[in-house]
Amino acid sequence: MIGHAARMRDIPDPEELRTAARACTVLAYAAGLAGIGAGTLVLRDGDLVVAIIVWVITFAVGAALMGVALVLRATTGITARLAQLSANVAVLVGDRYRDASPREHDDPWEGHAPY
């Protein structure tokens, strides 16, 4: 069975997700600029249909990359919030066990009816 620490290493931290979102945004702009340049060169050669196809494809690629960047930013916020909640729960559990008597954790069902 994989331990908690091993599973947490597989989850990227918020800074890594922010970096990936920035990279997707930069790639989207680069795809847009490359599409404009390539479409313009094709249009200059007199092939309007191919130029429009190049522009549409690069627009779709750029839009998809911007969508991925948006999802990564949302995931970053959720991951940061979950990390904060996890830390708060760890503190609360530690406080609960530190303040409780040792007898309190022996059998939680002791004294209850068996049905």
Image (spheres, grey):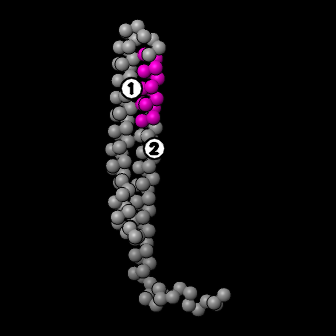
Q: Choose between 41 and 90: the one closer to the eye.
A: 41
Q: Is residue 31 above or below residue 99?
A: above
Residue 101 versus residue 20: which sits nearer the camera? 20
* Residue for badge 1: 32
Magenta stretch? 51-65
What residue sits right under mark 2 in the picture?
Answer: 71
How busy is the neighbourhood of tag 1: few (under 14 within 10 Å), some, or many (20 plus)?
Answer: many
Residue located 38% across and 32% down the image: 28
Q: Residue at x 45, y 53 (%)?
A: 78
Q: Looking at the rendering, which quadrant does residue 42 occupy?
A: top left
Which is nearer the N-term, disc 1 or disc 2?
1
In which quadrant is the N terminus drawn?
bottom left
Q: Amino acid at mark 2?
A: Val
Q: How crowded is the residue under tag 2: few (<14 C-alpha within 10 Å), some, or many (20+)?
A: few
Amino acid type shown at disc 1: Gly
Q: CA distance from mark 1 to mark 2?
A: 20 Å
x, y percent for residue 37:
35, 18
User: Is residue 62 inside the magenta stretch?
Assistant: yes
